[in-house]
Amino acid sequence: MKLRLDFRLFKRDPVSIKTVLIRTKKTKNLSTLTVTQIEPARLTPCTRKYRATENTEQCMDTLIYSNKDVGFSSKLSSPQFDKSATREQREKPALGFLAFISGEFVVLRETEKWGAVLPMEIIKTLPVMMAVSTRKSDIGARITLHWVSTDDLAKASFGPFDVSVAGNVEFIRLSLEQLEPFSGKSVNVTAEIKLPNGVIENSPALLTDVTRELNYQPAIIEGLVDGGIDAGTHPQGRLITIPVIEHLRPYNTLLLQWRVYAGNEKVFDQSVELQANRPEEAFMYSLPAQAYSPFKGFKGEFQCWIQLGTEIDSRLLWSTGISFFDIR
């Protein structure tokens, strides 16, 4: 089932969702999300080279949030539920968020080792949602979400929420205040469905890794002085150092991008991925001289992205900022 937020409701203005529960309304080809209370969003749209429009291709890999040059970039997906569930067994709830520009529900996929990874960067900047699949027989039922850390030191229940349309997917928003106590913990998340006759049915647990917010410093580019680098120096390569990133995880990846411009035209573009095999250490990369020595008089920029998700959820790219400089 594919889902999207119907932006005709919002007159093309960005929105932040105030309601806890979003109902689904089936159409012939698509289930369209409808929202009952809205207000203008306070998130900052993509800036600088890109313009926030309904065409999400304007931004790299479909922008989901950006605060100037720091923020998210992401591709989108639709909810994926547990296909192994039997008729007697409830499906696992799906965890995700609403993309800033498109309003798409982006699912955080579960891995065998880590579970569904929920970065604190998402919790602080985007609407976090849980999608609970219901049955046609759930008329009059109520849903309660239970979050219990695996060390049993943090636990909370959210709800109950009425099942609005039995047989559809119910979307429940969770706030920063509700989720922040789980920062740095592995959590078992279950959905409890209480039927009108008093019978209670529970879904299997969705293992969720709520990661701490990353703490990072600007990259250090060898020879960068007073906003410029000398094209004639470092003929054997220029060292780029990414200082230790606090709370980085082994599954994270760094994406380093080096670009050179002649006016507004990009004339050189190089990207490299660095795996966080030893996340407690600094990253070092030797940039080849061909990336700068032929470009005296040009403008350069360097950007570092952190891939927050696991290897199967590599859509979550968080920019740590851009360095601009002259090549002299």
Image: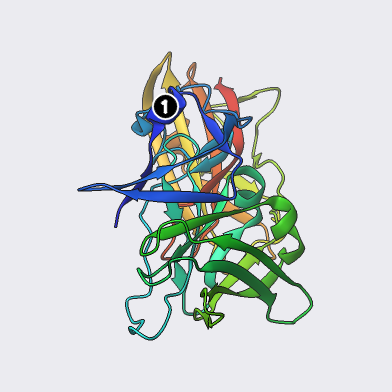
Dividing the image into 4 quarters, which one contains the C terminus? top right
In this orientation, which residue lies closer to the viewer: 244 or 10? 10
Q: Where residue 266 sits: x, y (%)?
A: 38, 24
Residue most extreme to the front: 197
Residue most extreme to the top: 263
In this orientation, which residue lies closer to the viewer: 324 or 202? 202
Q: Where residue 214 sits: x, y (%)?
A: 69, 54
What colour scheme does the image use?
Answer: rainbow
Mark 1: which amino acid?
Pro
Rendered image quadrant of residue 57: top left
What is the tally of numbered marks visible in this picture?
1
Q: Where residue 11 sits: x, y (%)?
A: 43, 22
Q: Is residue 278 visible?
A: no
Q: Where residue 227 sits: x, y (%)?
A: 66, 23
Give the answer, above or below, for where 184 lies relative to 70: below
Give the answer, above or below, for where 177 lies relative to 153: above
Q: Is residue 109 visible?
A: yes
Give the answer, above or below, for where 2 lies relative to 64: below
Q: Residue at 50% of width from left, 38% of height from top?
A: 100
Residue most extreme to the left: 28
Would residue 299 be found to the left or right of residue 58 on screen? right
Q: Residue at 43% of width from left, 23% of height from top?
A: 12
Classed neighbour count for the residue bearing mark 1: other residues with Cα under 10 Å, few (<14), some (14–19), many (≥20): few
Rendered image quadrant of residue 34: top left
Would residue 281 be found to the left or right of residue 193 on screen? right
Dividing the image into 4 quarters, which one contains the N terminus? bottom left
Residue most extreme to the right: 153
Q: Residue at 69% of width from left, 76% of height from top?
A: 149
Mark 1 falls on what kind of element?
Answer: loop
In this orientation, which residue lies closer to the viewer: 45 or 303? 45
Q: Residue at 70% of width from left, 49% of height from top?
A: 216
**Which residue position is annotated with label 1?**
294
